[in-house]
Amino acid sequence: MAVVLVVDDEFGITNLLEDVLSDEGHRVIIASNGKEALERAAEERPDLVLTDYMMPVMDGATLLQAMAANPDLKDVQVAMMSSVPEATLRARCPPFSVYVMKPFKIFALVDIVAGLLADK
């Protein structure tokens, strides 16, 4: 069972992803911002992080910087979710595994998650 950390300040998105990814057999951990995500990841190392870019307290770019600096988290794959164009995020953020344009199609996201976790 893979551990997926979902980080988004929109509760509708986190609740939807928690329900759908749990149904797919994953253990889902929820955080509403990057600071909370780091706290959750310290408690249980995720296999994958799905994070929004724009959030209060700590945004997605700052979360990725903190993960890259942490030996326990630097190799965790990250899917960046945003309505900001991918090229803009790639220029502003540390590297991430895949970009997911918001609004997303839930079954397409399930396929992305499956692909990223295929080696786990």
Image (cartoon, grey):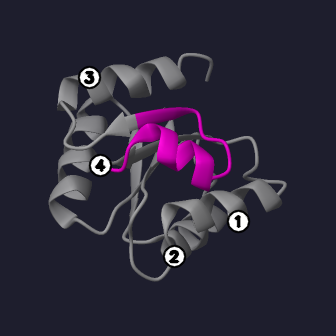
Type of residue at label 2?
Met
Checking the image for residue 119, the label placed there is none
Q: Quadrant of residue 14?
A: bottom left
Query: Element at badge 1?
Result: helix
Out of 112 and 27, give the one closest to the viewer.
112
Query: Element at badge 4?
Result: loop
The Cα–Cα distance between marks 4 and 2, rounded to whole angstroms, is: 17 Å
Assess disc 1: are there few (<14), some (14-19) or many (≥20) residues with their C-alpha within 10 Å of its C-alpha.
some
Task: Kindly identify which residue carries mark 1.
Answer: 66
Out of 50 and 95, give the one closest to the viewer.
95
Q: Which residue is drawn at the image coordinates 52% and 66% (left, top)?
A: 37
Query: Element at badge 2?
Result: loop
Residue 7 within the segment the image draws in magenta: no
| Residue bounds of the magenta highlight | 83-99
Q: Which residue is drawn at the image coordinates 25% and 44% (left, top)?
A: 102
Upstream in sequence: badge 4 or badge 2: 2
Residue 30 lies, in percent from the top left, at 38, 61
Assess disc 2: are there few (<14), some (14-19) or many (≥20) residues with their C-alpha within 10 Å of its C-alpha.
some
Task: Kindly identify which residue carries mark 4.
Answer: 83
Upstream in sequence: badge 3 or badge 1: 1
Type of residue at label 1?
Ala
Assess disc 4: are there few (<14), some (14-19) or many (≥20) residues with their C-alpha within 10 Å of its C-alpha.
some
- The reply to whether residue 7 is visible in this rendering is yes
Residue 5 lies, in percent from the top left, at 46, 52
Type of residue at label 4?
Ser
Task: Kindly identify which residue carries mark 3.
Answer: 108
Checking the image for residue 58, the label placed there is 2
The Cα–Cα distance between marks 1 and 4, rounded to whole angstroms, is: 22 Å
Residue 86 lies, in percent from the top left, at 44, 39
Which numbered mark, 4 or 2, is in the foreground of this view? 4
